[in-house]
Image (spheres, rainbow, N blue to C red):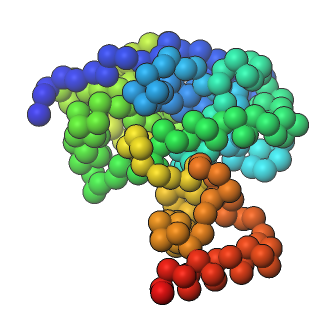
Amino acid sequence: MKDKYTISVLPPPHNQYTDENGESQCSAFALAGIMNVFARKYFGEDLKFSTSYIYGMYRRESNRTGKGMFEEEAVSGVSSAGSCLYEEYPQLDKAADAYDYVRVNPALTDSAKKYAVMFYGYEKISGKSREEVFEKAKAALLTYDLPLYASIDGHAVILCGYDGDCYLYRDSDGIKSLKIKDYDKIKEVYRLIMAERGTKRFIDVPDNHWGKDAINYCTEKGYMNGISEDLFAPDKALTRAEIAQIIYNILKGEE
């Protein structure tokens, strides 16, 4: 394996704030940056995604007073529901304002969903030791040529490469390194998994949805359809006519 590797195409830092209450948008900043790289690979376009939208949507708590973000919740949310574009959302430096703006503009959520098609899901990179995690992170970076999401002492960054036994990561003020003696500072590492182009996938049925296998089976067999090419609406109630149609499709398929 190479001794040095760096993902060359990384977005410039933008829209990362810490408000007067000390609440930082670092998790959202890192995820927006990773989405930017995915968009270049998936769509072939240089799309900038809104840090404030991600921060407002994936807050730790479900009310305005919540602090910070859960790492896995934020990664899961972005990989299953995407983010709206930077120009669609104002640059908000207060956590409560970002939270409120999402909820009074529901159309933004629909706009965000169309970019979730880039993702197949995510996985947490874990191991029995920090050194094992480092080796797995190196392998993931080299294999997929995509950045990883990482948390260093509770601060989210874009993990973009390695140099010998050092992590290389993108922070808001540039590329930095983390040496082996400081590996205990790495708290979480996640790989967002890029979807294969042309793969049929409902953007509102994430990879970790409890009904994913059943939904995929029934739609592939033709027993049920989504409400559109990209949406299944897993929480939508069925009418009696729709139930009859499903039964008809199943019985017809068995003839």
Res 179 seen here:
no
In the rendered picture of this protein, how many numbered marks are placed on residues?
Answer: 0
Name the residue rendered at 29%, 46% in the picture: 133
Quadrant assignment, res 81? top right
Along the line of sight, the residue nearer the viewer: 15 or 208: 208
- Whether 13 is drawn above or below 123: the answer is above
Quadrant assignment, res 57? top right
Question: Where, quadrant-wise, is the N terminus in this rendering?
Answer: top left
Quadrant assignment, res 176? top left
Along the line of sight, the residue nearer the viewer: 230 or 153: 230
- Whether 238 is drawn above or below 57: the answer is below
Q: Position of residue 203 (x, y in %)?
A: 58, 49
Name the residue rendered at 58%, 20% in the picture: 48
Q: Position of residue 148 (x, y in %)?
A: 39, 35
On screen, residue 211 versus residue 182, left or right, reads: right
Q: Position of residue 97 (x, y in %)?
A: 83, 29
Res 21 seen here:
yes
- Whether 76 is drawn above or below 97: the answer is below
Name the residue rendered at 45%, 36% in the picture: 149
Name the residue rendered at 39%, 27% in the picture: 41
Q: Position of residue 77 (x, y in %)?
A: 60, 46
Considering every residue shown, the one lying at the far left of the view is 1
